[in-house]
Each structure stands twice: as C-alpha cells, then as structure tokens.
Image (spheres, rainbow, N blue to C red):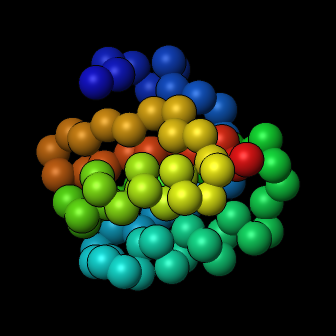
Amino acid sequence: MVDSEKSLPACHAELDTTGLYCPEPIMLMHNKVRDMRPGEVLKVVASDPATTRDVPKFCSFLGHELLTQQEEDGRYLYFIRLG
C-alpha cells in the first residue's frame, strides 16, 4: 500500500470505472489503450473486486506492465505502462 499520492507514478491518461462490474472495466480498458502509445501510463480506478484478478491478467495477456496495484476502502487503483 502506498501512503502518499506523491509516490504514485505519473500517468498520461486516467480511466474511472467506479460503479461498473465485470466485464465492463476491462472492456473500457481495451478501448482506452487503443488511443494510447507504448510506454504511456494509464491510471485505472475501479470499485469491482474482480479487477484484482482481471487487471493483472489483462496486462499479462497483452504485454503491459502493471506498475502499481492497491486497494483502499473498497477502491482499487492500478497504474499500467503500455507495452
């Protein structure tokens, strides 16, 4: 768990999927990364606990790097560097 927002990676784009449930967060991530370039960082905010399983698999399958994954008060935060 990261204590400070200042220690989080810088991001090029942000996607808030709060209130959405599987498979919607991953579908929106697919759409968002299409508009981005390799090496850029996407910040994803989610409320669906299934994202703790789905986001790492999304990254592994598509060759992206999961830089940070954390959970606090039912909110999940991911930073992904596009491959």
User: Would you identify the image quadrant in which residue 2 lies?
Assistant: top left
**Residue at the (56%, 68%) spot, across then down:** 29
**Residue at the (65%, 77%) spot, across then down:** 31
Identity of the residue furthest to the right in this view: 37
The vertical placement of 38 against 7, above or below, is below
Identity of the residue furthest to the front in this view: 61
**Residue at the (34%, 67%) spot, across then down:** 18
Left/right of residue 71 with respect to residue 30 in the rendered view: left
Q: Nearer the viewer, residue 71 or 22?
A: 22
The answer, for residue 30, to whether it is visible in the render is yes
Instruction: Where is residue 46? Give x, y as percent.
Output: 35, 60
Instruction: Where is residue 40? Give x, y as percent.
Output: 76, 44
The vertical placement of 16 against 20, above or below, is above
The number of callouts visible is 0
Left/right of residue 17 with respect to residue 42 in the rendered view: left
**Residue at the (73%, 47%) spot, across then down:** 83
Q: Nearer the viewer, residue 75 or 62?
A: 62
Instruction: Where is residue 6? Give x, y as percent.
Output: 51, 20
Left/right of residue 75 with respect to residue 32 in the rendered view: left
Left/right of residue 71 with respect to residue 5 in the rendered view: left
The answer, for residue 12, to whether it is visible in the render is no
The vertical placement of 16 against 24, above or below, is above
Q: Nearer the viewer, residue 1 or 53?
A: 53
The quadrant of the image that shows the N terminus is top left
User: Would you identify the image quadrant in which residue 4 lies?
Assistant: top left
